[in-house]
Image (cartoon, rainbow, N blue to C red):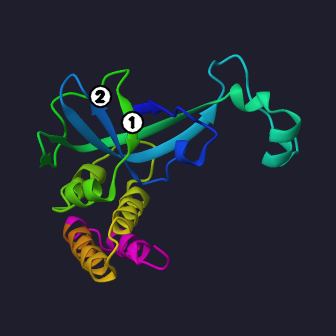
Amino acid sequence: MTAEAALPNDEAGRPRFGSFIKAVSTEDKLEILAVVLDVVTSPPDSLHRPCALGLTREELKREQPHIFALLKTEIRAVNIGFIQAGTVYQHLPPQPPQVHDFVYAASPEEIIAITAELDFLRLLFHLSTTVPSDELIAASIREAGRAYSDATEREDFLVRAGRAVCQLFRSDYERMLSIVKKIKPSNI
C-alpha cells in the first residue's frame, strides 16, 4: 500500500518505521491494516529536486515557508490483515485499498487485535523489498508492544513475539538472535 500524507510536515504525517496504519475502505466496508515500510518526502514531480539549504527546519519555516508546500510525503506499507464487520482477519485483504481511501494511524486496540496471533510476522518474513525484513520485524514488534498500556501485558506480548521469531527463524540462528536482541524493550 502506498499513501500520501495529508499533512506532510506534521509529525503525524510521518509515521514511524514498523508502526501500524489502517486504510478505511467505506465502499468495501473494510479496514485494512498495514505495517509501515518507508516514509519519503519529495517534490510532487520528477523535475524538481530538493537540496539542502544549510538552514534548520525552524529557520526554513520562518524564512521560506513556501518550501514545505512544495513537498509531499508518501508512506509505503505492507498489508497484514483487515477488519470487516468487527472481525479481525490476520491475512491479506480480499482487495487492496482504493486510491481515495483515507489512511490513519491504527488505534492501540486495533494493533493488539491484529497482532494477537502474530501471523503477520510470516508476511514480513517473506517480504521481498529493499527494506531489510529483519529490521522491519523487530520494529513492528516494538511498535505493537507500545500499544499495551499495562507493563505486564506488554512484557507477555514481547515474550510471545520473541518465541514466534525463534520459531520462524529456527533454521537461521544468527538472524533469529539479531532480531530478538532488537525486540528487547529498552524505552518502548
> Which amino acid, mark 2?
Pro
Q: Quadrant of residue 29?
A: top left
Residue 134 at x, y = what percent? 39, 60
Q: Which residue is mark 1?
A: 103
Q: Which residues are magenta?
A: 168-188
Residue 4 at x, y = what percent? 49, 30
- Is 165 included in the stretch rendered in magenta? no
Residue extending farthest to the bottom is 152
> Which amino acid, mark 1?
Val
Residue 180 at x, y = what percent? 36, 74
Q: Say which residue appears at 48% left-offset and 38% top-offset.
A: 75
Location of the C terminus (image quadrant): bottom left
Residue 27 at x, y = what percent? 21, 22
Q: Which of 125/152 is in front?
A: 152
Q: Is residue 186 left or right of residue 69?
A: left
Question: For the residue labelled by badge 1, is the local secondary structure a helix, a strand or a loop?
Answer: strand
Up the image or down, 126 lies above or below 108; here it is above
Foreground mark, 2 or 1, reads 1
Q: Is residue 157 left or right of residue 60?
A: left
Q: Are marks 2 and 1 in contact (CB under 8 Å)?
A: yes
